[in-house]
Image (cartoon, rainbow, N blue to C red):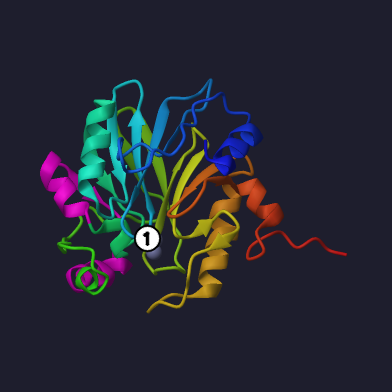
């Protein structure tokens, strides 16, 4: 088992449902899974996709076995095979932001399952428009541009199965970045806003460091220290842990 994930499972007091990363050879998809005992009604399977090792999340409503695919950046065959392994019904594609490694596979996935694409915020349209050329530049293969069926805004919510996730607009890494928060499950999918020990880059066009820090402190932290988050890259963590230790956004203790 991945040591960091194992420690983290212990840290969180989660029962056991973290599953070790499976390397490409045999089972291409399932990277780690967790459920929260008690209130748990949602299960998340992480699928690492693209050369940037982006965490695509397959989020399943356990009651209905209906699922949303969050940030399918590419490697769509691995996503298809994870869906098949779990035997769930895909209901929609959700996007945190317009970067290639997060939405390069969105159109093919949505077309394959005949489902809609929701997100990100419309301020990321300029990134989505660039998908085909970005994809060529980074050697990702085909990535089609598209227009999401629904642009999201702060205060919106998204549904799949019996589950609801709240939408928060968190600009900074990109101007149209949103995050998804399951209040019932105390789980946030934060894309490239926040990582374990780091934050998203802000040196892209229309990126803004002050906005990003403000997004973390004013949108994420109020959701609660106990919230587990899945970042766009790397291991999961909690908001409380990052508030205490993350050098970019930790709380400053007055002397
Ligand atoms: Zn990004
Ligand atoms: Zn990314």
Residue 141 % position (x, y):
18, 63
Residue 227 screen position, x and y as percent: 57, 41
Q: Is mark 1 within 8 Å of ligand 2?
A: yes
Which residue corresponds to the image point at 69% horizontal and 55% vertical from the top-left?
245
| Res 120 visible | no
The quarter of the picture showing ligand 2 = bottom left
Please name the predominant secondary structure of the magenta segment in the image: helix
Residue 201, above or below 29: below
x then y, percent, for residue 75: 24, 51
Along the viewing direction, whichever of 75 and 239 lies nearer the viewer: 75
Look at 24% across and 25% down and name the residue there: 87
**Residue beneath the point at 61% across and 44% down:** 224
- In this view, the residue in front, 96 or 109, is 109
Report the side of 32 relative to 104 (left or right).
Answer: right
Residue 234, percent from left and from top: 48, 52
SS at mark 1? Answer: loop
Task: Report the span colored magenta.
Answer: 105-133
Residue occupied by mark 1: 52
Quadrant where the C terminus lies?
A: bottom right
């Amino acid at each position: 088992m991945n040591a960091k994930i194992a420690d983290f499972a212990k840290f969180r007091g989660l029962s056991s449902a973290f599953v070790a990363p499976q390397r490409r050879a045999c089972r291409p998809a399932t990277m780690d899974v967790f459920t929260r005992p008690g209130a748990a009604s949602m299960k998340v399977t992480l699928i690492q996709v693209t050369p940037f090792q982006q965490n695509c999340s397959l989020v399943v409503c356990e009651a209905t076995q209906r699922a949303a695919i969050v940030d399918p950046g590419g490697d769509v065959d691995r996503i298809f095979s994870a869906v098949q392994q779990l035997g769930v019904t895909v209901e929609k594609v959700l996007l945190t932001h317009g970067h290639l490694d997060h939405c390069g596979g969105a159109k093919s996935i949505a077309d394959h399952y005949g489902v809609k694409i929701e997100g990100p915020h419309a301020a990321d349209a300029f990134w989505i428009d660039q998908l085909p050329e970005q994809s060529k530049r980074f050697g990702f293969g085909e990535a089609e541009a598209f227009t999401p069926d629904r642009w999201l805004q702060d205060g919106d919510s998204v549904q799949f199965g019996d589950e609801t996730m709240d939408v928060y607009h968190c600009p900074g890494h990109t101007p149209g970045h949103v995050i998804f928060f399951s209040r019932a499950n105390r789980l946030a999918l934060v894309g490239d806003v926040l990582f374990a020990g780091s934050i998203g880059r802000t040196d892209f066009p229309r990126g803004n460091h002050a906005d990003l820090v403000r997004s973390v402190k004013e949108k994420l932290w109020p959701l609660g220290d106990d919230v587990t988050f899945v970042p766009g890259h790397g291991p999961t963590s909690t908001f409380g842990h990052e508030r205490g230790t993350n050098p970019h956004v930790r709380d400053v203790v007055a002397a």
